Image (cartoon, helix red, strand yellow):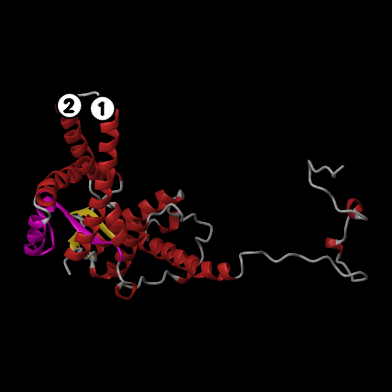
Amino acid sequence: MSELVTGEAVALELRPAKLPSRALAVLIDLVVAVLVYVGVVVGLVAATSSLDDAAQAALSVAAFLLVLVGGPVAVETLSRGRSLGKLAFGLRVVRDDGGPVRFRHALVRGGVGMIEILMTFGVVACVASLVSARGRRLGDVFAGTLVVRERIPQGRAGVAPPPPPELAGRFGELDLSAVPDGLWLAVRQYLTRMHQLQPQVSWSMASRLAADVAARTGSAVPPDLQARPAAFLAAVVHERQARQTRRPLQHESGGASPVALPPAPGADVPAAQAPGPAENGSRSRPTGFSPPA
């Protein structure tokens, strides 16, 4: 397993994708691109039937470059390295340092890919991937990128340490829905390996991750935990795991809250729950309610 090293000298446990999964992902992307290209060409032929053959040929070449080259570049840029085929197989394109790809990386990969994939039917890309230690094709080498597996088997993932007892359940009201999966993965990897890092590097990386999580949740790191960012991250991860554990139980029970039944006739009703004058004989209606005619 090859390791990616971040700017903080932390090795990330992201495994490079193997050739079969990459080839199948490329095949899915090519099928979708060809279908789109055929549709665009048919539309152009119908719309430009009055033009001469040279103009129609120029439009066909432009459509080819736009769909089969510009399309994948735009998709990789907007999706941060996840095309339709890569999404189906749990793959993603990242930089050599583990960061997300940008337009220049996607442009180089797409330009070189036109030669090594489209013009050579993938032969050059397959040979380059087999020769490379991390399975990179020429487009990845020139762009400084790598295709990795995002789906890591759960049994091989490290176990995050529990938070301090006084922090368990403290962040029950925190909104964690906006935190992306990639950030959760980085936090878990840090928590499982923070004892292998130098203290200064560990504290610096924990502070950055805690700031990212706080920015996503919309709540700042509590003042008493700003000097202990690792404890904050452990408490937030523990809260997320607790919510994921409770979710199936709420699903089974239907998520319905218990309904309070009215007291039986003749039963003693506490004074705090005794009906007031407006409730004797009839229930109070909400504002804006009008009985049917």
Whole-percent x, y for residue 40 in the image: 28, 38
Residue 148 among magenta residues = yes
Q: Where, by quadrant of the figure, is residue 193 drawn? A: bottom left
Please give the name of the residue rendered at 89% of the width and 50% of the height, measured from the top-left corner.
Answer: 278
Q: Residue at x 88, y 58 (%)?
A: 275
Counting labels gives 2
Amino acid type, callout 1: Thr
Q: Secondary structure at mark 1?
A: loop
> Residue type at mark 2?
Ala
Q: Earlier in the sequence, mark 1 or mark 2?
A: 1
Looking at the rendering, the stretch of residues picked out in magenta corresponds to 123-151
Q: CA distance from mark 1 to mark 2?
A: 9 Å
Residue at coordinates 17% horizontally, 26% vertically from top-left? 55
Q: Which residue is mark 2?
A: 55
Q: Which mark is residue 84?
A: none
Q: Quadrant of the C terminus?
A: top right
Disc 1 + disc 2, Cβ < 8 Å:
yes
Pointer 2 local density, CA inside 10 Å: few below 14, some 14–19, many at least 20: few
Q: Position of residue 214 (x, y in %)?
A: 41, 52
Which residue corresponds to mark 1? 48
Name the side, left or right, on which 187 lies relative to 175: left
Residue 117 picture location, percent across and down = 13, 51
Magenta region includes residue 258 = no
- Image quadrant where one finds the N terminus: bottom left
Helix, strand or loop at disc 2?
Answer: helix
Q: In the rendering, at what x and y percent does residue 269 appear?
A: 87, 67
Instruction: Judge whether residue 10 can be spotted in this image.
Output: no
- Left or right: 25 with respect to 269? left
Seen from the viewer's position, the closer of residues 87 and 142 is 87
Query: How crowded is the residue under tag 1: few (<14 C-alpha within 10 Å), some, or many (20+)?
Result: some
